[in-house]
Image (spheres, rainbow, N blue to C red):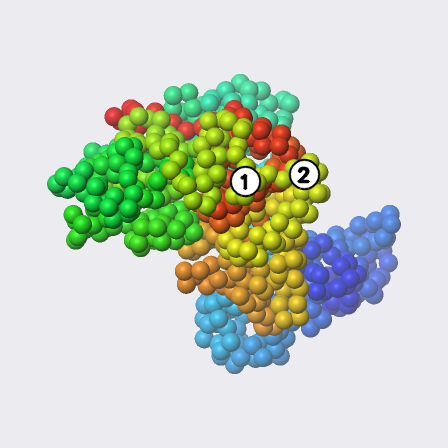
Amino acid sequence: MLCEFDRLIYPQSITAVDASSYMIALYHPCEKIKDSTGNTVTQVKAVGYCLPTSSNLRYDMLGHWSKNPKFGVQFEVESYNEVVIPTKEGIIAYLSSGQIKGIGPKIAEKIYAVFGQQSLEVLDKEPERLLAIPGISEIKLKKIYDSYLVNRGARDVVAFLSPHGITPNRAVRLYKEYGEKTMDIVKNHPYQLCDMAGIGFKTADHIAMSMGFDQLSTERVDEGLLYTLADAEAKGHLCMEKHEFVKACLKILDTPALTSEMVANRAARLVFSGQLVSYQGNVYRAKTVHVEEQLASAIHQQMKHRKMHSYGDLDAAIDAEEQKLKMKFAPEQREAVKMALTQGLSIITGGPGTGKTLIQRAILDIYQKNNPKSEICCCAPTGRAARRMEQATGVPASTVHKALGLMADEDGDYDGPEALTADLIVVDEISMLDVYLAGYLFDAVKYGAQMVLIGDADQLPSVGPGAVLSEMIASGCIPVVRLDKVFRQNAGSRIATNAKLIRHGNVGLEYGDDFQFINSPRLSDSAKLIVDLYLRETEKYGVDNVALLTPYRQKTETGVNALNEHLREKVNPPDAQKPEVVFGNRKFRCGDKVMQIKNHDDVNNGDIGYIRKIIRIGDDTTVHVDFGDGRMKEYDSSGLDMLDLGYASTIHKSQGSEYQSVIINLQCAHSIMLTRPLIYTAITRGKERVTIVGEKRALCISIKRTDTEKRGTCLAKRLQGLA
């Protein structure tokens, strides 16, 4: 059916339309046509996803007639093509029709002036040549090309996948990867979509089931098995015990006719083909087991191969450090310094106030004096922890990612690390390293270098999979010094004292000006108290030096999402001079404190920044975020899914950071989240003051509860096997 756009019925405004919108629109036929009842029509009511709305073009639509009991006869659009008249006027009209975001009449004329009749061919096959057009930057070109794909080849893919919850950006990426084969793959091999980051098994399974695929097909069961392990990894596990693995897969596939024997047989086939690996009663994905094996091997090699340094009388060197620092090392602190300087790999673990920072300074001072030509690398998982490390030791420090030259792509995946040339590597906040980042780090260390790992084994494990620090300690293969005695006597000393009490399961905490509890059983009351308290604390310490931590992101009135909205309106209220941009259900305002929620380039998940500028030019919006350390990043509208408001944070996301004042919400409603590592991690973020708002019973439950699920990993066993 050849037709022209008349007007939009739903949504009511074209500005409310995006590439995933379900739409109802009226079109004028350009030829004589009849509907399904045999009547000649002069106007067609069309329904579908991503319908065209430009009045400057004609469209050749494919679809079928249907009769709706309420709305009558309508045309269900399955696909369409723009009909472009191959003249200067026709090509410019198409380019500037509004269908392709980023190209207006002036840019369209410039494109035609350079490429003439080849303009559409260039856009289709060599889009990078458009960078020669004044006014088209790389960011703008990406927007133009993605929009063009949506409106040409990828349009049908977008329309087909939108009802299944797949975003237009993700659909466009699918089309970029598979090209003209995309629709065939989507319709006939939907489980192949599981390979695409951001889609996954559940969405692919939903598509397959909607098209009548066999629930018992081997393809479905196999992908379900692989997804079961991927889902476990998202929860921190590298592997699963065999029987639990089969049981979890059955639950995910949710098919009564599917038996545990059938699933176990398919798992055995995947082990035989190498997609799964079995080890001591546990099952891994092949990719994951390789990472754990490589890490164990690298740790083992690090302990074997080290360059010997001569320090003369180490006790005398430590005595000199005591005079310089005007303090006296306890026996275990002195032991930690000696161990770090004489071992190829060592671990120092302890809570706040136990002297880890002073020990770092002593290690670095003695090493530099005795090895003036040697290179040192100090690093930590987060920028905030690295800055704290540098301030405390006087030695330059960076994030682990920066030290290794790791840059994440849009899926959060990294290329291999750059080799470290340092002779001594000191890593702080080691508990935050998941198996992948730890693997990159150990792979990058040169032969003969020394490594000193410093952290707190009682904190929450890494956000990513694995339990690297606790497994290294549990193996018994690596030299470890545990610091237990609290020495801190200055401001915030009750924080250190209470951290030790919590570590030993003691609910009799000490309270005072630097450690307070405010009883508030009702969530609504707690939310108001927290907001008021945050405003007072930020006025005293500054926004950068106050953290508001809560266990949940959603679910409650004191969840991160709800608190972020309340706090933003207080801390950074709307103003005519502050531009805003809306992305989905999120709104960002110039001046907002934001958090990166996905690794990308040199900005890591959990990094905090501030929106400095929001610039609009035509349809283009660019958000400029300052993450400190000279990292000013630009985000177009498609990249805003990597940002969230950062006034409040989950306790997990706060790892690796310290603040002058920390406000924590603990309610019985947080139920399953209430654990000793959680409350311990939360209070140890505070340097001068900690305030807990909520229920005392929730606090006691947290301190007493140690029955947390052990992460599925065999790193300790592998290290013992290599020893």
| Cα distance between the residues tagged 2 and 1 | 18 Å
Pick the residue in front: 140 or 639: 639
Instruction: Kindly indicate the quadrant of the structure image that contains residue 454.
Output: top left
In this figure, what is the number of numbered marks? Answer: 2
Residue at image point 28% right, 40% down: 328
Say which residue label 1 marks: 512
Residue at image point 48% right, 76% down: 133
Judged left or right of residue 404, residue 571 is right
Specify the quadrant that holds the N terminus: bottom right
The amino acid type of the residue labelled 1 equals: Gly
Residue at image point 30% right, 54% down: 394
Q: Which is nearer the N-term, disc 2 or disc 1?
A: 1
Q: Position of residue 606 (x, y in %)?
A: 49, 49
Query: Where residue 520 is drawn, which disc sits there?
Result: 2
Pick the residue in front: 599 or 50: 599
Judged left or right of residue 514, residue 719 is left
